[in-house]
Image: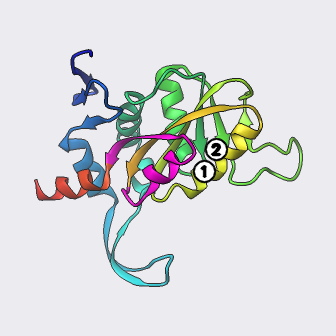
Amino acid sequence: MQDDLRVAVEGHDCLIQAGCEAVRVTFPLARRVNDTCHLTGRFRLRSGQISGEYFDKYLFEGQPDLLREVAEAMVALLPECDVLAGMEMGGIPLATVMSQLTGLPTVFVRKHAKEYGTNKVAEGGPVNGRSVVLIEDVVTTGGALLASCRQLRSIGAQVETVVCAIDREQGGRQNLATEALQLRAALTRRDLETSVMG
């Protein structure tokens, strides 16, 4: 068993524990993401309920410095792979920055294959026979990821890992595991909540 390895990601201390897939990014990144994305006001949720709070994930993705910082934390979680696959729509900016940071090619995964032209579900280079890591911004239950994984596997991609910016800890990890997908998250809902109390 190798020793724990401590690495620096743009000024943030990360701990990679031996035998553990998680890389813990310290408090400052969670705090910045939460401060940027946590809104208060009056919001209608998908369920139809009204809430006084809302987490707008696109706000961190729209800020270049914070987007890069989150992408760097996600790069530290990547296994050996051939291709990154950014999920429509929030995974695409993250996968693009991660591609620039690592030199790995990226494809962009549609929720549904387009019905004209090339009829592709994954836009960009080839995935057949290649080790592909799915990139997502926020994972809740993992339903869309499971559907995309099935589509990618059906065209020959080898998909075993999902790397996300935030795991909302609402069953996604367990649901993905039912189809042999490992979830690696830069931040969790617990990290964001703890950052507010710190």
> Tag 2, which secondary structure?
helix
Q: Which residue is mark 2?
A: 149
Instruction: Pick the residue in front: 194 or 19.
Output: 19
Q: Residue at x 81, y 51 (%)?
A: 114
Q: Position of residue 152 (x, y in %)?
A: 70, 40
Q: Which residue is mark 1?
A: 146
Instruction: Pick the residue in front: 177 or 22.
Output: 177
Q: How many marks?
A: 2
Q: Amino acid at mark 2?
A: Cys
Quadrant hosting residue 125: top right
Q: Is residue 123 left or right of residue 23?
A: right
Q: Is residue 146 left or right of residue 1?
A: right
> Tag 1, which secondary structure?
helix
Q: Magenta region: which residues?
A: 168-187
Q: Is residue 183 magenta?
A: yes
Q: Is label 1 in contact with label 2 (beta carbons under 8 Å)? A: yes
Q: Residue at x 49, y 84 (%)?
A: 48
Q: Amino acid at mark 1?
A: Leu
